[in-house]
Image (cartoon, rainbow, N blue to C red):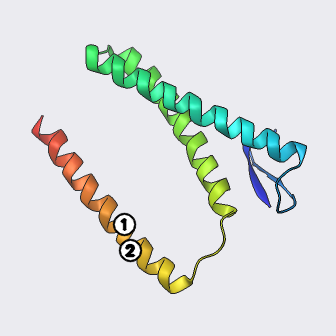
Amino acid sequence: MRLLPWQGADGKPCYLDTDASGSSFLSRLADNVEAVQLGLGRDLLANVRKYTAEQAPPESDLRVMVAHLCMALADALRVAESRGGRLPVPDVDEDARETVRLRQVVQSFNERAIGRWDAT
């Protein structure tokens, strides 16, 4: 089962029961929609970075940017969940060790980023 990059009419996730090759029309369409979603998110992030680097935006602009960034992040998380669900299942013990290492790296990164943010 593949999680599709769009929601159903009731807001619930849509899944596609597809073959392993992923060569069906709906699979290719989902791949294209994911690529567009990620590209739009990438462009949005670049524009927000550029805009906020050039000036201190008004609060109303910040609200709009945050709303659009939240939508882009939701799309990216859905793509990541869908693609992650299609990966082979790793060895549980190695997966657990890798998860712990990854959490430590992310925590260290966050602590440094927050420290830099607090310093400004």
Q: Quadrant of the C terminus?
A: top left
The residue under label 2 is which amino acid type? Val
Furthest-left residue in this view: 119
The image quarter containing residue 82 is bottom right
Q: In this view, does 27 lie above or below 68?
A: below
Residue lying at 87% horizontally and 58% vertically, measured from the top left: 18
| Secondary structure beneath label 1 | helix
Residue lying at 63% horizontally and 34% vertically, measured from the top left: 37
The residue under label 1 is which amino acid type? Arg
Q: Which of 49 and 60 is in front in this view?
A: 49
Q: Distance between the residues labelled 2 and 1?
A: 5 Å
| Secondary structure beneath label 2 | helix
Q: Which of 74 and 22 is in front in this view?
A: 22
Q: Is residue 104 above or below residue 90?
A: above
Q: Is residue 34 left or right of residue 117?
A: right
Q: Is residue 4 left or right of residue 108?
A: right
Q: In this view, does 21 lie to the left or right of 58?
A: right
The image quarter containing residue 60 is top left
Residue 73: give x, y in percent of width and height: 52, 40
Tell me, for residue 64, which label it has, or none.
Answer: none
Q: In which quarter of the image is the N terminus?
A: bottom right
Tell me, for residue 100, which label it has, or none.
Answer: 2
Residue 88: give x, y in percent of width and height: 66, 71
- The residue indicated by pointer 1 is 103
- Residue 44 makes an appearance in the image: yes
- Residue 67 makes an appearance in the image: no
Residue lying at 36% horizontally and 72% vertically, measured from the top left: 101
Sort mark 1 into few (<14), some (14-19) or many (20+) by Cα contacts within 10 Å.
Answer: few
Q: How many labels does the image show?
A: 2
Residue 33: give x, y in percent of width and height: 72, 36
Is the residue under label 1 in contact with that under label 2 (CB below 8 Å)?
yes
Residue lying at 48% horizontally and 31% vertically, measured from the top left: 69
